[in-house]
Amino acid sequence: MQQLLQQVVSGLADGSVYGSLALALVLIYRATHIINFAQGEMGMFATYVLWALVTHHGMSYWPAFVLVLALAFVGGVGVHTVVIRPLARAPELTIVMATIALLVVLNGLAGWIWGPDEKVVGSPFPNNSWNVGGVLVSEQSVGVIAITLGCVLVLWLFFRFTKVGLALRASAVNPQASRVLGVRVPWMLALGWGLASVLSAISGTMAAASFYVFTPSYMQSVLIYAFAAAVLGGLESPLGAVVGGLALGVTVNLLGHYVGWIGSDLQLPVALAALLAVLLVRPGGLFGRVAVRRV
């Protein structure tokens, strides 16, 4: 039982990283019905900026972290303004290809600026653990889970109780009607990209702290897990994205620990197979709804 609980705790920490990036994917999808394949690389680039601020400019972690989140927000707004908004009338496939191109550009740019070798950014949390009934719970795991749940709470309050949040929701659901009511839809969508970029930065920095080392490609596997989590929870459900991430993290850890033939190499294929099985039963995901159109 102690081993089981230990794997669950570790899985929740990993799942929090997947869930935060899945939440960013859901925000973009709800606003534009497009999957941003560069979401993970945006988080990776933000992590490198954090590493540079801490390592080369002598900043302490948390002030640098706050500055990186602000820069990530500006970067997300800039990506929407420069790359996505000019393609607003283009086919969806064109926008998807643009996000893939952005993925390649950010990955190559990070390798060109900072080099391909492994970097260490350190953890923002103390390297201590609590012994709870024989289960070691690290402060790192608790901190990552708390930050992810805090993001969910802040976003829920923002979308539920602020005029800007309501305008952003309206712009995503019905842009034409929102324009008639005076909502500046392009600015609302840019705000959504900025918030998604902040979530990517949080996911990237937390993943780098969990992995201890990172390279320009370290977020690509996280993106696959995050996409699986978003689909599992429902691509239009922010809560489902986080729940899907937590469930996926726990499932992958349990499979890797208790099913000997899976190991680390087959964790992702088996997790995706389990995802496929769930979608065959609920195509809209655990929290999604399947739209039925009567002809």
Image (cartoon, grey):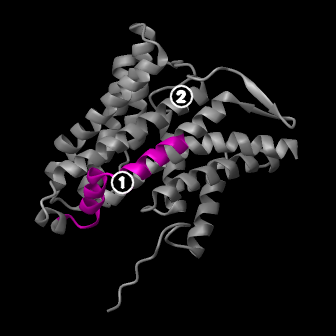
Farthest residue, direction bottom: 295
Decide whether the magenta segment is chiefly helix, strand or loop. helix
Provide residue 232's location: percent of width, then percent of height.
54, 61
Q: Nearer the viewer, mark 1 or mark 2?
A: 1
Whether the magenta-drawn stretch holds residue 98 is answered as: no
User: What residue did someone put label 2 on?
Assistant: 208
The quadrant of the picture occupied by the C terminus is bottom left
Is residue 31 in view from this perspective?
A: yes
Q: Is residue 263 visible?
A: no
Cβ–Cβ under 8 Å for marks 1 and 2: no
- Work out how far the residue at label 1 is from the one at label 2, CA to CA, in angstroms: 33 Å
Q: Position of residue 202 (x, y in %)?
A: 46, 35
Earlier along the polypeptide chain: callout 1 or callout 2? 1
Q: Which residues are magenta?
A: 148-175
Which of 171/104 is in front?
171
How packed mark 2 is, by other alpha carbons closer than 10 Å (few <14, some 14-19, many 20 or more), is many
Q: What residue is shown with label 1?
A: 161
Q: In the orientation shown, which residue stands out farthest toward the front?
A: 161
Q: Name the residue located 51 percent from the left edge and 72 percent from the top edge.
A: 283
Q: Position of residue 83 (x, y in %)?
A: 20, 44
